[in-house]
Image: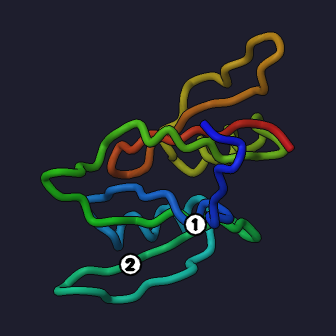
Amino acid sequence: MSDTTATRITHIGAAAIHVDDQDKALDFYVGTLGFELRMDAPFGEGNRWIAVAPPGATTTIALVKAHDAAQAGIDTGLRLVTADAAADHAALSGRGVDVDAEIMQWPGVPPMFSFRDPDQNMLYIVEGG
């Protein structure tokens, strides 16, 4: 790779999560997780562009209708950052969210746990700054 390689890309705008029911997913991400609804707009023939994000976040999560080539129920690989993994684990568990039984903790690695949305998409919460 050359030292002159450059890009005009400035940031990550959105990560997509495929869901079977966009209304149910919207209720979970906004109503249960406390995310903000950033956009809910029709596009194309019968499609919706739904974007949600934690309050103040720049990157959004697009709740995209699942289809044959991109199905719901996967490990998204998304890591959401929190100041207190234990508090979030307890709060989400108390709201009936499908969370890991215990917080993962290894020396030198921040505390984290995974949870699943109503479509069984797996996301992670990692303690950090």
Name the residue at 35% across, 43% down.
Answer: 120
Q: Is residue 121 left or right of residue 59?
A: left
CA neighbours of label 2 inside 10 A, class few (<14), some (14 to 19), many (20+): some
Residue at the extreme left of the image, as rendered: 68
At label 1, which amino acid type do we have?
Gly
Q: Quadrant of residue 76?
A: top left
Provide the secondary structure element on which disc 2 rests.
Answer: strand
Name the residue at 62% across, 74% down.
Answer: 36
Task: Look at discs 1 and 2 and give the one toward the viewer.
Answer: 1
At label 2, which amino acid type do we have?
Trp
Mark sitting on residue 81:
none
Mark sitting on residue 49:
2
> Is the residue 118 above or below the residue 44 in the image?
above
Please name the residue that numbered disc 1 is placed on: 13
> Is the residue 13 above or below the residue 5 in the image?
below
Point out residue 26 in the picture as x, y percentages from the top left corner. Answer: 44, 70
Residue 74, can we see it? yes
Q: Give the camera-side residue of 91 and 123.
A: 123
Name the residue at 78% across, 37% down.
Answer: 127
Name the residue at 13% across, 53% down.
Answer: 68
CA neighbours of label 1 inside 10 A, class few (<14), some (14 to 19), many (20+): few
Point out residue 92 in the picture as x, y percentages from the top left corner. Answer: 61, 46
Q: Quadrant of residue 66?
A: bottom left
Decide which of tag 1 and tag 2 comes sooner along the chain: 1
